[in-house]
Amino acid sequence: MKFGEIKLQTKVNIQTNDFPEFGLDSVFCGIGSCFSENLINLLHDCEFDTAQNPTGIIYNAYSIMQAIERCAHDRYYNESDFFKYADLYHSWEHHGNFSHKDLDTAVSFANNSLKEFAEKLKKADIFIITPSSSVTYVYKETDCIVANCHKLPNNYFKTRVLTVNENTEYLQHAVNLVHKVNEKCKIIFTLSPVRHYPGDLTLNGRSKANLLAAIHEICTTAANCCYFPSYEIMNDELRDYRFYNPDLLHPNELAIKYICSRFTETVLDKTTIRHVEKALNAINFKRHRRMNS
C-alpha cells in the first residue's frame, strides 16, 4: 500500500439525494436531546431563523410526540399541569429549566415557549427530530411517562424501555402532527450520539437500536422524511475518546462542530455553506479576541 492510500478514518456515506438544498432564508425547527440544541444553536448563530425545544431538552419518543401534539392542537398548560417539590413548581412534560418558585410564572413561561414554537413550526422548512433514548421513567402514581424526574426519589418511578413498535408509533404520530400543521416541511431524523448509560452499555445499545429501527422504518415509509447519521458519524468517523468531553459520554466542541459541518454540507446550497463558514470564522475570531483581551 502506498503512503498516500492509507486511510485514517471510516467515512459515513450520506444519501445526499434524500436532502433538498436549503438557503439562508430557510426556517429550522428542532426538538429532542442536547445534541439537537447544539445543532439549532449553531444555525441560529449563523443567522438562520430557528426555534427549538418548546419544553426544554427531552430524550424519549413519547415526550417528543407529547410536545408536538400540544403545539399542533394549541393545547396550552394550566396550573393543574404543575406540581410543587423542593420549593419549585415543576411539570412532568418539561425540563428543569422551566421550573420556578412562582406557579403563575411557571405556567406563563411554558405557554409562551409553546406558542412561539408553534408559530415557527407553521412556516418551518426543516424540522429536526433528535430522540436520544428508549429508556423512559414512569411516574408510579399516574403510570405516565415523564420527560424529567426533577430529582424526585427514585422509588417514585419505574423504568421501562420503549420497544421498536412503541418508538415507531410515537414518532410516526409526531411526523403526522408536523405535516398536519405544515405539510411542506422536511423532517430530518437524527439519533443523538450521547451515551446515557455508561454503567450498562448493553442497555445503552439496546436503547439506541430500538430507536434506530423505528426511525428507519418511518423514513422508509413516510413521505418527506429522511435520516441524518449523527450517531454513526460520532461512532465511526470520530472513533476516539479525544472527541468526547471528560465525562466520556458527550461529544466535545470539536466533535459537535464536525458533525454540524457534515450536516450543513448535506442540507444547504453552496452559497449558503460559504455564508456559514464566514459566520463561524467571525464567531471564532470574536471569541479569540475576548479570550486574549
Image: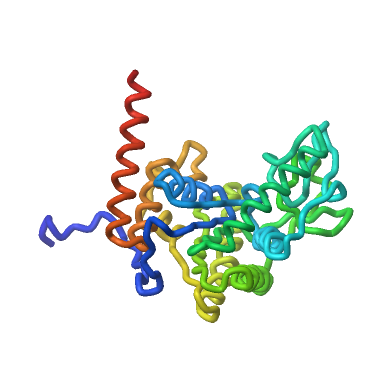
Residue 247 visible in rendering = yes
Tell whether 32 sits left or right of 125: right
Tell whether 101 sits left or right of 258: right
State the residue in front, 171 or 208. Answer: 171
Tell whether 124 sits left or right of 277: right
Residue at horizontal 36 percent and vertical 50 percent from the top: 258
Residue 71 screen position, x and y as percent: 68, 60
**Toward which corner of the image does residue 76 lie, by quadrant?**
bottom right
Q: Is residue 260 above or below residue 286?
A: below
Residue at horizontal 30 percent and vertical 40 percent from the top: 281
Figure disc tally: 0
Residue 39 screen position, x and y as percent: 47, 50
**Toward which corner of the image does residue 215 lie, by quadrant?**
bottom right
Q: Looking at this view, name the residue that lies furthest to the top.
A: 293
Residue 23 screen position, x and y as percent: 37, 60
Residue at horizontal 34 percent and vertical 35 percent from the top: 284
Q: Quadrant of the N terminus?
A: bottom left
Q: Looking at this view, name the residue that lies furthest to the left.
A: 2
Residue at horizontal 55 percent and vertical 48 percent from the top: 34
Q: Quadrant of the C terminus?
A: top left
State the residue in front, 125 or 52. Answer: 125
Residue 223 screen position, x and y as percent: 52, 78
